[in-house]
Image (cartoon, rainbow, N blue to C red):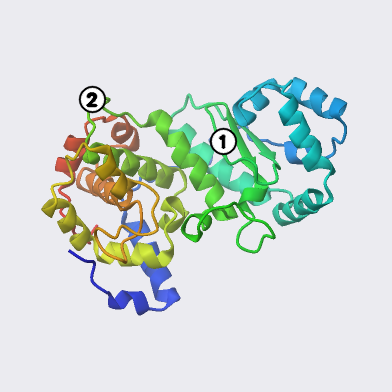
Amino acid sequence: MQIRHLIVCQISLLIGLFFLNSCQNSASTEDIDTSKISVKLDILRFDEAMMKLTTREQIKGFLSKNGRFVNVFYQTTPDDNALIDRLMLIHNNPDTKAFYEETKQSFGNLDALKKQFEVAFKHIKYYYPDFKEPQIITTFTALDLELVVADDMIVIPLETFLGPKAKYRPQYPDYLLRRFDKPYIVPSVLTILAKKYNAIDPNDHTLMSDMVFYGKSYEFTRAMLPEVADSLLIAYPDYDLVKTWNSQDLVWGYFIDNKLLYETNDRIKDKYLSERPRVQEIGNDCPGRIGQWLGWRIVSRYRTENPSITLVDLMKNQNARDIFEKSKYKGQVED
């Protein structure tokens, strides 16, 4: 079954964005007030501090004082000579120094990033009062490493999120590169943080279970960043999101016709969950990770059909089949 070519593909960007906002606003959300919630939020600019280090002794001293950071981000110890050699090269090479200046100028004082993290952390604390804000650290690695999210630490290599105008970019195909831009930083962090609260049944290895897991992760991120567009949360271009929304009856029909919901073969599941430019088994217009998107639709419908279920209730529910059955989802566009 192929996804049909839709007229909506040719609509103007303005109408498309209006539609996406309507989709987002129609989803189940809880009306909450975070104005009285305080969070501790400071960003350590290790990018600035480290790029001033030019000798081995300076670098070794910095790494020794920040052992936890080295363990989490570099996955090694502060006395790793290979790491010190690499940092020496980055900090003293004219090309990488110029690249850092481009990064520093692009990001400025990080005010926008701080504000979005503050919104997200306040929302997390509303739902989970015991939430302890992780330390946020920014770095510069000359594209050596990527975003790292741990319970107590978030490390952001700023240069990986410079966007399409950057002189150098991460070595990924175009369909992945779009998310290496500033607007994707906080949504990416929140989707990873969601794992801490996302209960799963370790004995359920079905595609349905995986789909619902991803759906709960995106629903969590949407709740913590209520003003952020769905296209940024799931990293689909607006074009793909609109088109997929309108074709979901056909996508759903493919999953049902091919009995995929309770598939347990990892190779088959990967076709619908993993990063791919297109899921050609369904159609040339079907974006990768379609199973993740479909899982989000199921979870969103579940919340719509069961308004008394809070976000915390949802995240604690490890029964994917229960969520699916109570969602009453059958590929319908209406939310």
Amino acid type, callout 2: Asn
Q: Looking at the image, which residue is at 44% across and 51% down? A: 233
Left or right: where does residue 196 sit relative to residue 61? left
Q: Looking at the image, which residue is at 44% across and 75% down? A: 14
Q: Quadrant of the N terminus?
A: bottom left
Q: Is residue 38 above or below residue 3?
A: above
The location of residue 275, given as percent across then percent down, is: 40, 50
Residue identifier under label 1: 148
Q: Around disc 1, counting alpha carbons within 10 Å, would you say few (fewer than 14), some (14 to 19), or many (20 or more)?
A: some
Amino acid type, callout 1: Val
Cβ–Cβ under 8 Å for marks 2 and 1: no
The location of residue 114, given as percent across then percent down, is: 63, 44
Q: Around disc 2, counting alpha carbons within 10 Å, would you say few (fewer than 14), some (14 to 19), or many (20 or more)?
A: few
Q: Is residue 303 above or below residue 5?
A: above
Query: Is residue 34 something one can see in this rendering?
Result: no
Give residue 248's mark. none
Q: Quadrant of the C terminus?
A: bottom left
Q: For the residue labelled by badge 1, is the local secondary structure a helix, a strand or a loop?
A: strand
Decide which of tag 2 and tag 1 comes sooner along the chain: 1
Residue identifier under label 2: 203
Q: Looking at the image, which residue is at 49% across and 27% down? A: 131
Q: Nearer the viewer, residue 150 or 144?
A: 144
Q: Looking at the image, which residue is at 40% across and 68% down? A: 239
Distance from disc 2 to disc 1, alpha carbons, whole Å, reads: 28 Å
Left or right: where does residue 285 sit relative to residue 184? left
Query: Is residue 133 something one can see in this rendering?
Result: yes
Quarter holding residue 145: top right
